[in-house]
Amino acid sequence: MRDLSYIPDCRGNLGDWKARHRIAVRSPRADVERPFLTMLQGWLDYAKWYEVGFGSSIGEDYVLADAWYHIGTALNEMLNGDLGTRLDLGTLNTIINDNLTEQGWDVDAG
């Protein structure tokens, strides 16, 4: 699973967005960063806990998989709101989408 430490490998001079994002993830501000990152981390942690506890991925569960998927897509929708200036929303979108894909969903199907 891709976690919050993920930073894309980009070439070229992209300014200091990577540093700002990394700092925001490591030390989120209490305003909007911390609540959002706490929800995202909880979503990721639940999938990890599920796999350890049940020996299979959350995407294989016939009851909980859809709920986990809907939480992930809702977190993605929240990226359209105001999350401050330090978090890189494209990176967060990649973390969410890659985990949804890993669990068996086609995020491009809409």
Image: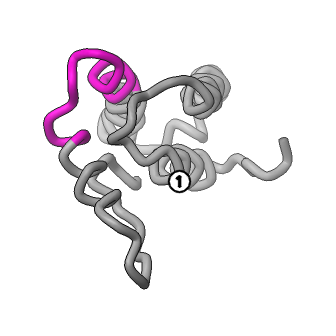
From the top left corner, tell me how far across and down residue 54 is, in percent.
39, 35
Residue depicted at x 14% and y 35%: 27
Q: Main secondary structure of the magenta part?
A: helix
Residue depicted at x 34% and y 67%: 15
Task: Answer above or below: position of 31 versus 43.
Answer: above
Label 1 Cα neighbours within 10 Å, binned few <14 / some 14-19 / many ≥20: some
- Kind of residue at badge 1: Thr
Foreground residue, 101 or 37? 37
Provide the residue designation for mark 1. 94
From the top left corner, tell me how far across and down residue 92 is, in percent.
46, 45
Q: How is the image coloured?
A: one colour
Foreground residue, 55 or 41? 41
Task: Answer above or below: position of 7 versus 22.
Answer: below
Residue found at the very far left of the displayed protein: 27
From the top left corner, tell me how far across and down residue 56 is, in percent.
46, 44
**Residue 20 on the magenta span:** no
Residue depicted at x 67% and y 26%: 66
- Give the magenta-colored segment's residue range: 24-39
Left or right relative to 18: residue 10:
right
The quadrant in which residue 78 appears is top right
Q: Quadrant of the C terminus?
A: top right
Left or right relative to 104: residue 28:
left
